[in-house]
Structure formats: C-alpha cells, structure tokens
Image (cartoon, rainbow, N blue to C red):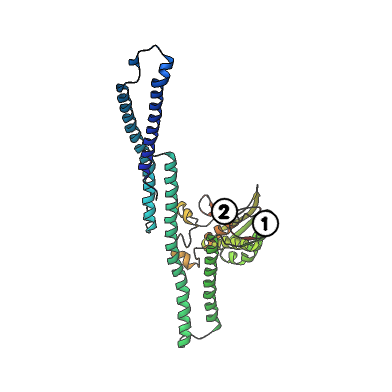
Amino acid sequence: MSGNLNARITKTMVALTLIAAFVVCLGMMAYFLFIYDWIYPESDELAGWRTADTVMVLLLLAFGLLTASGIGWRLAWRIVEPLKSVAAAARRIATGDFSARAALPAGSFREAADLLADFNTMAERLERAEAELAYSNSAIAHELRTPLTILRGRLQGMSDGVFDPTPELYARLIAHVDHLSAIVEELRTLGLSTAGQLELTCDPLDLAEEVGAALNGLEAELAAAGITLTRALAPARIQADRTRLRQACVTVLENCRRYAPQSHVHVETRTEGDEVVFRCSDTGPGLSAEDQARAFERFWRAEASRGRSLGGSGLGLPILRAIARAHGGEARIVPHPPPGLTVELRLPKRAQPAGKTDD
C-alpha cells in the first residue's frame, strides 16, 4: 500500500539533506585529519578540527534539515492538493453526482492545472451524457406511447365492434406501425453509432447522383408542401455507403418539408479539396442561435408540440451527424442570415469510418 505522498516527499528531502551533510562532514574530517597536515606540516595544531567546529556543523545540519522539511512539505502540498480535489470529485461522480467538479488550489503546477481541466471536461461530458440519456429514455417512452395507444384503441374498438374493419382503418393502423418501425430503426442507427458499430459498405459513387435521386423521390412531397426547389449538383466523387448517404439526404429534405413549407429550398453538391460537400438551404422560419446549438440533440425540437404534430421524432439531425461521423466527416448548421436554415454535410473523398467498414 502506498504511503502518504506528503510524508514520502518530506522524508526524501530530509534523507537527501542527511546524505549531503554526511558527505560534507566526512570530507571536512578527512581534510583536517589527513590532508591539512600533509599540505601544512608546520601549522599550529589548534588550526585542526575542534569541538566548536563539530557544534557548528551540527547546527548547520539542523538548520538544513528544518529547511528541507519545510520545502519538502510545501512541495508535497502543491502536488497533493490537486490530486485530493480530483479524488474527492471522482468519489462524488462514482456515487452518481455528475455535477461534481475539481477545484484548482492556488499555486498549483501547470501540469496539475491541465489535469484538473481535463477531469472537469470529462465530468461535464458525463453530466451531459447522463442528462441526455435520462431525457432520451423519457422521450422514447413518449414517442412510442402515442402510436401504441392509438393502435390498442383501434384494435380494441374493432374487437368490441365499435369500428368496422374497413380498408381505410387498416391503412391507418399500418401507417402507425410504419411510424413505430421508423422510430425503432432510427434508434438502432443512433445506438450503433454511439457504440462505434455503425457498419458501412463503401463503394465509389457520385454524391451529386445520390442527392439527385433523393430529390426525385421526394419531389412530389416537396411540391405538395409548397416548396420551390432549385439545385446546383456539381459532380462530387466519393467512396461511401450509398444507402446511408441516401438516408442522410432524405433526412435533410424531410426536415425542410416538415418545418419549412411554402419556402424556397436550394440544394447543392461540390468538391472542396479532399472533401465533398452537400448543402441544403431553406427560407423557412429557421432557428435561433441557442436552438442551433441544440439541434443535434436526440429528440430535441424547437417547438416540441409542433414537431410531434408534424410527424417529426426529433431524431433526424442526430442521425445525419451519426452518418457523417461514421464516414469520418461532420454535419453542422451553417450560419445563415434570417430567415432560413442551412444544413451542411462534409465528408472526406475516401471514407475514414469510425466504426466497422466493409469495403
């Protein structure tokens, strides 16, 4: 079991002082007893080693020991106090208090300051992850409860004869089941991304073609939402997962359809250096700076009630970022003059997956 660091440093300083004093005493005694007489054979014996010299050496040794003890204890305190602060905060975090932070004592070393800064950053991320997990659990329960309640009510009504089993009713029930399936698949994608296990099947492709295909598939729905669509799809060759990229494009366009109806949407692709860029801009209501900072949080909506009424699960942008990071890229909201919102996806030309990849 390791001993107290304060005591060990102090003992080390004292031991070094004693060793130095011992070496000095031996040297002085050898000098006066042997070397001095050989160098000065005609000198007076009174000039040799005397009791007063021994007393003076002992006094100097005592002073050196006290000084070494003080310096050692002070040095040990400056090293140990930051460690104690980190240890105390770590014990609080271990008990579930993720708000614990380590405090930096005055006069600490730079290395200790770096250690505490890194620890507090880790604690902050743990606290944020814990809050997100708690919120996600609540949000998942809420998202699944509504369609399940509707399904149960309709099925119970059909069983009791309240509702007639018409094709329209079956179609609505199937739509609720599809909504549940979509939520489950989105949660699965995010879970795999968090665990670093989002599998990719990377092939050479043109991002412009994939975005164009996604636009063609949603063109009717976008037009029905009153959206005027323009595109500037420059060739952007990349090695990536075709299905995941199509999913990312559809996610961005679906957000425009839900939250920016009656707006102008401009979609573009291009190559910038070693990266390819997909950017989608709309002239809808947009988001405030505070909302933009939270836009990639799971289940977050700028207006929760409006988001649910429009069919959004609050998982679209988090999935977009998960797909981007799985390819070694990033998704972000680009500063945009109001009104409107611009979402950008940047990917390396050759994917550098964070998780498992099958080329």
Which is nearer the eye, 306 or 195? 195
**Residue 76 location, x and y as percent?**
37, 40
Looking at this view, name the residue that lies furthest to the bottom.
161
Residue drawn at the location 42% of the way across and 52% of the way down: 123
Which residue in the protein does label 1 denote?
A: 239
Please report whichever mark, 1 or 2, sits nearer to the chain's N-terminal start: 1
Q: Secondary structure at mark 1?
A: strand
**Residue 88 location, x and y as percent?**
36, 51
Determine whether 151 is above or below 228 in the image.
Answer: below
Residue 255 shown left or right of residue 104 in the figure: right
Residue 8 shown left or right of residue 357 in the figure: left
Three-letter amino acid code of the residue under disc 1: Gln
Which residue in the protein does label 2 denote?
A: 330
**Residue 346 location, x and y as percent?**
60, 53
- State whether residue 98 appears in this view: no
- State whether residue 55 appears in this view: yes
Looking at this view, name the residue that lies furthest to the top.
42
Residue 287 shown left or right of residue 93 in the figure: right
